[in-house]
Amino acid sequence: MNEGLNKVQIVALGKATEDAVLKEAGKDVKAGSYPVDFQVRVSGEIKKGEDYSQEIVAKADPWLLLAAALSKLNGVTVDALVREALTADEALIEGLKVKAADAIQAVKGPTQTRCNGKITTNLQITQVAIAA
């Protein structure tokens, strides 16, 4: 698929179009199959920073925490809990969300992680040729 392209050229292709522009264009394409055959000239510069270490906060899976909590309850209690959640008022729900967020924060911990250097670009698409 990427015949003849080196790693830098592949990165340049991926970075040449801003994510927001790509997302917006994707919305405008209707369902279907489209033949594509064109050439594009991408020029500019790519910079890659040095690798670095950073504290990354461990992600706590809220569904795993919920499953563990529910496993401690019997079926009748789980059913009652579900019924109460479906009929609870908004103020109670907001208070429970705050408590849940605090509990999840308590089980998360930062981990020193080696990260790849950031890639910044200054690229322009300067020529487009459509196949005849």
Image (cartoon, helix red, strand yellow):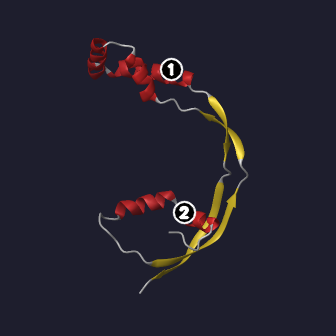
Q: Amino acid at mark 2?
A: Gly
Q: Say which residue appears at 30% left-offset and 64% top-offset.
A: 30
On the image, the x and y values in percent for residue 116 come to 66, 49
Q: Is residue 47 above or below residue 126?
A: above
On the image, the x and y values in percent for residue 32 come to 29, 66
Q: Say which residue appears at 37% left-offset and 21% top-offset.
A: 93
Which residue position holds label 2? Answer: 14
The kind of secondary structure element at disc 1 is helix
The kind of secondary structure element at disc 2 is helix
On the image, the x and y values in percent for residue 115 come to 66, 45
Give the left or right position of residue 92, taking residue 20 as reference: left
User: Does label 2 or label 1 sit earlier along the sequence?
Assistant: 2
On the image, the x and y values in percent for residue 56 come to 62, 36
Q: Say which residue appears at 26% left-offset and 18% top-offset.
A: 83
> In front: 121, or 65?
65
Q: Distance of mark 2 from mark 1, alpha carbons?
A: 39 Å
Tell me the number on the disc at residue 103.
1
Q: Quadrant of residue 57?
A: top right
Q: Residue furthest bottom?
A: 132
